[in-house]
Image (cartoon, coloured by chain):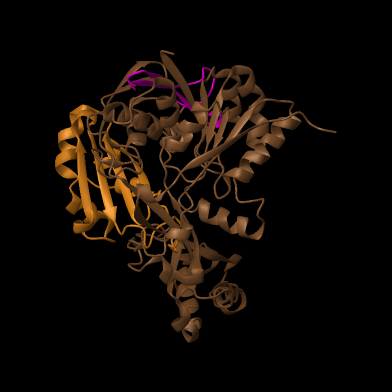
Amino acid sequence: MSVLRIGAGAGFQGDRIAPAIALAERGQLDYLVFECLGERTIALAQQARSLDPSQGYDPLLERRMRAVLPACVRSGTRIVTNMGAANPRAAAEKTRAVARELGLTGLKVAAVTGDDVVDRIGDFTLDETGTTASALGDRLVSANAYIGIDGLVAALNAGADVVICGRASDPSLFLAPLVHEFGWARDDWTRLGRGILVGHLLECAAQITGGYFADPGVKDVPDLANIGHPLAEVDRDGNAVITKLDGSGGCVSRATCIEQMLYEIHDPARYLQPDVVADFSGVQFKEIGTDRVAVTGASGTPATGLLKVSVGYRDGWLGEGQISYAGANCLARGQLAIDLVRDRLAHISGALLEQRGELIGVNSVLPTTNASACPAEVRMRYAARCPDALTARAVGEEVEGLYLAGPAGGGGVTKGIREVLAIASTLMPADRVAVTFDMQEVQHETA
Amino acid sequence: MRLHDIAHARTGDKGDISNISVIAYDAAHWPLIRDAVTPERVAAHFGTFDAGNVTRYDLPQLQALNFVIRGALTGGVTRSLALDAHGKCLASVLLEMPV
């Protein structure tokens, strides 16, 4: 194989499915990758699994598999995904059930496991809290290491058509097929670094085809409503062309590529990954055709031998309420509403871990903003983090109370509470993490 | 003029760290952007963190800067009380900077 075609089916858990179907049906892809895990997703999934042991994988897994499996099987497109979340084996089982229903007998589905390290996290100190994970006690929900390509490549080597993992570094989902197909050495830091760049560019799907980009009159994106997901044509040396399907909306340009290359990157010369430290500092992008951008110049240095671990823990409850004011003097009435809620919560302020009142449309994004003139309307929002659900509920109740006992003309109250699931991180030696996979074929449906 | 007239930008987040890229539309504006958009001016523009929290990385071949801001997200995406806990809006706020 001289050029590998890899497409991005999803860039987050809630991503749109239609562009993935288009890629499966018309992309002539070798691989379709679904990246669906945010920082907190796996902790939420672990909570779901603890309530029901058959759950804990991506809630859209069944819909996505049903939508793309027939076309992928027809085209010989293999699927790699982290939709296993907190339960890759159950996700594989569900995928086999879907395939069986679709008559896709013989499909090989593998689950990669080993990222769950909650049983050995206790002594590790968490960066954000400064305490050990064991100090969280029963608030600890999950601990997952960002694994690299080992388990994924092993499953592909064994012939898996669908590989499902939980927490892996996002670009690893794309690097694994490249290493499997091109046989790159595990100390070929340059090519591994280039593969990571391809993965990093694709992992957020539409964010490189004109999503998270449009700024009317300045950065216009054609046919954004029908935006397509990206695909990369990657050669044996890891150089690539980023493009999208003809007929899909959006755009791939030097500008979209540069924005995405730096997305969630700190030092561009040292992008820490499980299998390599990727170096993007010398990358070049060149527009070589309509919606075709050539990417060259990434490299890499040896991996650190440490894996990042995300630790999920319960961190109280968030209570919130909102109310709108409009027209004459609305800015002052909104500010009065904030002051009233703060005063009325004062009797429990000792129980509030953190609180803030703000005016949406004025200073909710940047608290230091001062309105230069009274806007046409403001929406007051009051939020607090509380130790328990009952205290959190009081926040929204005091906002609701403004209807009769607040400033003139307040309307449209909304209120709610939710449990805060926080994430902290630490580093774990890679040799403390044992990755494995198991693979099963889809069998004939038995009567 | 505003930075928005000559550059585009994107925000990313990891924990309580925000990164904002600033990219010249036209290579001719790169020297101005490189000289004007310093960590000190970025911190002063937002007013919610110190310049010491900001690290700037330069990518001259792409005419791009990458600002990494520690403690920018009031505790990070998962526990922040902010409406935009990811700080997705911050890049456009930065583009309001006069240059």
Query: Is residue A233 a member of the stretch shown in magenta?
Result: yes
Q: Position of residue A296 (x, y in %)?
A: 29, 23
- In magenta, the rendered stretch is A222-251
Q: Is residue A172 above or below residue A288?
A: below
Judged left or right of residue B78, residue A79 is right
As for residue A445 lying within the magenta part, the answer is no
Which residue is rendered at x = 59% and y = 24% of the image?
A: A24
Please name the color used to draw chain A: brown
The residue positioned 39% from the left and 51% from the top of the image is A432
Residue B14 percent coordinates (x, y): 37, 51
Between A161 and B28, which is closer to the camera in this rendering? A161
Question: Residue pushed farthest right?
Answer: A447
Residue A360 picture location, percent across and down: 46, 59
Query: Any idea which chain is the orange one in this picture?
Result: B
A4 versus A113 height, above or below: above
Q: Nearer the viewer, residue A347 or A38?
A: A38
Where is the N terminus of chain B found, in terms of image quarters?
top left
Could one spot residue A210 in this view of the protein?
Answer: no
| Depth order, front residue of A410/A290 | A290
Residue A260: x, y in percent? 37, 35
Q: Residue at x 33, y 21 (%)?
A: A239
